[in-house]
Image (cartoon, rainbow, N blue to C red):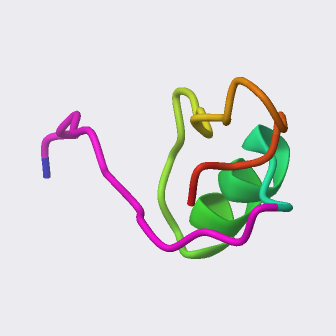
Amino acid sequence: MEDQLAKLFVGNLPHSTTDASLNEFVTQAGFQVASAIVIRDKVTGGSRG
């Protein structure tokens, strides 16, 4: 089967979620991850969920 590339949006993340923890979670689910980026609040620095 041919590899396919896709973007995935994940909402409702805990504010403590980091790029690394999101990457690890998706990898453990059996997917290859090119990059995992958590959007952060400019004021608090926490995940925007």
Q: Is residue 9 above or below residue 13?
A: above
Residue nearer the viewer, 16 or 3 = 16
Q: Position of residue 12 (x, y in %)?
A: 50, 73
Q: Main secondary structure of the magenta part?
A: loop
Q: Position of residue 21 (x, y in %)?
A: 81, 56
Left or right of residue 18, residue 22 in this image: left
Total numbered labels: 0
Q: Is residue 5 above or below residue 26?
A: above
Residue nearer the viewer, 1 or 20 = 20
Q: Position of residue 42 (x, y in %)?
A: 70, 24
**Residue at image location 60% in from the left, 69% down from the top:** 13
Residue nearer the viewer, 17 or 23 = 17
Check if residue 4 falls in the magenta segment. yes
Residue nearer the viewer, 8 or 42 = 42
Q: Is residue 17 above or below residue 42?
A: below
**Residue at image location 70% in from the left, 49% down from the top:** 47
What segment is highlighted magenta in the picture?
2-15
* The C terminus sits in image quarter: bottom right
Left or right of residue 38, residue 21 in this image: right
Residue 44, image quadrant: top right
Q: Residue furthest front?
A: 43
Check if residue 42 falls in the magenta segment. no
Left or right of residue 47, residue 46 in this image: right
